Image (cartoon, rainbow, N blue to C red):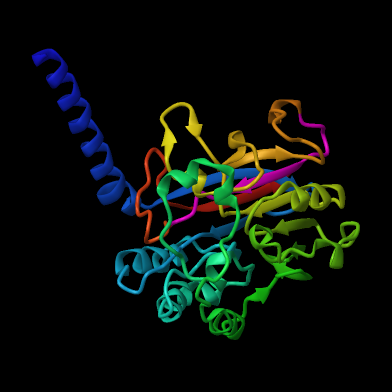
Amino acid sequence: MSTLLRTVGGAAALGAAGLGWAGLVERNWFTLRRFTVPVLPRGARPLRILQISDLHLMPAQQRKIEWVRGLAGLAPDLVVNTGDNLAALDSVPGALRAMEPLLEVPGVFVMGSNDYYAPVPKNPARYLTRRHAQAPPGRTLLPVEDLRAGMVAGGWTDLDNARTTVRVGGTELELVGTDDAHIRLDRYSSVAGPASTSAALTIGVTHAPYQRVLDPMAADGARLIIAGHTHGGQLALPVYGALVTNCDLPTNRAKGLSRWWPGAGSTPSSRAPADAAWLHVSAGLGTSPYAPVRFACRPEATLLTLLPR
């Protein structure tokens, strides 16, 4: 009996330590990921894209605000914000303050469900089920139009179900985006079409990387697709990785850089065709205020350096 009690007590202590780490340390241990992506034409100069995603900002999170502001020191050529910036009715001023120095740089954005709707308490166990991928009805509306107006006033382009071109560093880029597929606001068909032949690169941007968005983007010739939403699984297992993605993206692509092509499914990137798109999914910088933990999945922003093929 004493051995059993020691075993149970040890497991409980280990669990408490893990929960303390996930809730007090790791969720605030922000990091910058760096990847190189060979997608530009030969002879093009490298371009640096900074991706910000899933802030889920509460007004009191001053450390997170200042950390994001400091990313302007990276001097990116383009900023891509992939949504879920807000976590409360009064989060817009803090979110715009966080992005203020970055608004000096050309940028684009799409919205996520947590820009439209406030988070709600839920059973944490639902995160491990597919039911969690359904946005619950009756949620409080957030001031998304104030956020949108602030970013547009700062010079960024709204890519929600939109297509545009931008010139950065002397290179013309085409960007095509969708509103959040997680709450079925995506309308890729309204902006679908072959990649521009005059642009050096077509980039797809979406919040939630559902396959119904990724597949047509890749088929149309987007050679880089940028998304967020998954939180990298948020609660991951060391070595194994994410347990869930909160959408229909396979867990082996829950965060980081991989390859994507129509019908890729769970096929490993090593078997990608030569013309497959590069897919980057950010694990994001925040969590729901009702699930403020991360384990084996640090909050992150990403600097993508685009290089000639």
State which region is magenta.
Answer: 272-285
User: Foreground: 3 or 218?
Assistant: 3
Q: Is residue 284 left or right of residue 178?
A: left
Percent x, y of residue 255: 55, 43
Q: Which residue reaches farthest left?
A: 2
Q: Is residue 158 left or right of residue 299?
A: right
Q: Quadrant of the N terminus?
A: top left
Residue 46 lies, with reference to residue 198, above or below; the image says above
Residue at (42%, 56%) from the top-left corner? 287
Residue at (35%, 54%) from the top-left corner? 292
Q: Is residue 81 left or right of residue 88?
A: right
Chief SS of the magenta region: loop
Q: Which residue reaches farthest front?
A: 1
Q: Is residue 172 visible?
A: no
Task: Give yes or no for residue 284 being in the magenta stretch.
Answer: yes
Q: Is residue 20 left or right of residue 125?
A: left
Residue at (43%, 44%) from the top-left corner? 125
Residue at (61%, 68%) from the top-left corner? 111
Q: Quadrant of residue 199?
A: bottom right
Residue 305 lies, with reference to residue 163, above or below; the image says above
User: Foreground: 190 or 244?
Assistant: 244
